[in-house]
Amino acid sequence: MKIGYHLTPFWSPTDRPPTQILDEAIEVIRESASMGFGWVSMGQHWLSHPTIWPQPFPFLARIAPETGSMRIKTSMLLLPLLNAVEVAESVATLDHLTHGRLDVGVAIGYREDELLAAGVSRHDRVRKLEESIALMKELWSGDTVSFDGHYAHAHGRMGFTPLQKPHPPIEMAAQSRGATERAARLADAVFFGPQVAWRDIASLAAVYRRARSTHGRVYASRCLMVGTSKEDAASRARQYLERTFRMYSTWQMQESSMVPLQLDFERSLDDWTVHGSPADCVESLLRARDETGLDGVGFTIYSLPPDPAARIDYLRMIAEEIVARVT
């Protein structure tokens, strides 16, 4: 089982100039490159004030030479909001800049402000995502394309195709049975979101494997909180948890088709996070590996300290006391 980490907590606290936020993140990523993490990943949102979400393509290109052998993931591009030709071209460029270390994570999106800004509705999301993936795969083949879809019309050929053949691995976010079956049909891997409970990951992973005609990988994003005990870890992360719950509640993340998401303090942290002492965290991960067959876990580190030097030390502790014991 491989372990990576997600950059969302790196943009907090937000009381620093944006240049400082990005420079400090680059410094920490550079130092983490030799610690044993499998990847670093980055999400996407628009119009996100008061939270901060730098856009993935420019930032991932910037950190490509800093990341050593770690893979770099878009986790997740909100594909229905984007132009599929531009995404295909940007992916090809970034795949070469990373020397073939890119994984392309995609999701359908859910925020009304973002959908409105992109000129699409909630009813467009699945159709546009599927059409976009079909078009991108055609473009990445290197053949001349004549594509007339509902959302895009593309006639021509890309200047160069991705380094990885036939294309970088596609990972698809899932928080429902339908999304899981879609990932099995269209993508190379499924990636369950951090608010999906462990029990639902187990059942959805089984759905994914039954629906696959060939081998596919199963990943899960998990909130990581490390302390001297489970109580201490939860206490350290409480402020970040409160902000996260408030953000996702405002954004109306829960949809009727999804499994119940963990968006408040009513559910035990044991149900959906990795938290406690390093030994507690190792136990949780090994149990999840045995019960669900996870190929990898992406940590969103809720107890990340604010100072860059402290962040580097904290990541090193996670790498030595948790990652090294489960990979």
Image (tube, grey):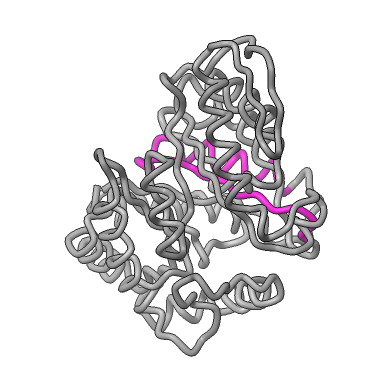
Q: Residue at x 46, y 79 (%)?
A: 234
Residue 49 horizontal/vertical position (percent): 80, 62
Residue that protrudes farthest toward the bottom in the picture: 266
Horizontal side of 186 relative to 9 (left or right) equals: left
Q: Is residue 307 above or below residue 268?
A: above
Q: Which stretch did the figure color magenta?
A: 21-48
Residue 212 horizontal/vertical position (percent): 28, 46
Q: Residue at x 58, y 38 (%)?
A: 131
Residue that protrudes farthest toward the left in the picture: 290
Q: Residue at x 58, y 29 (%)?
A: 135
State yes or no: residue 185 in magenta.
no
Q: Nearer the viewer, residue 312 or 149?
A: 149
Horizontal side of 147 relative to 29 (left or right) equals: right
Residue 226 horizontal/vertical position (percent): 41, 68
Q: Residue at x 66, y 45 (%)?
A: 24
Horizontal side of 6 relative to 87 (left or right) equals: left
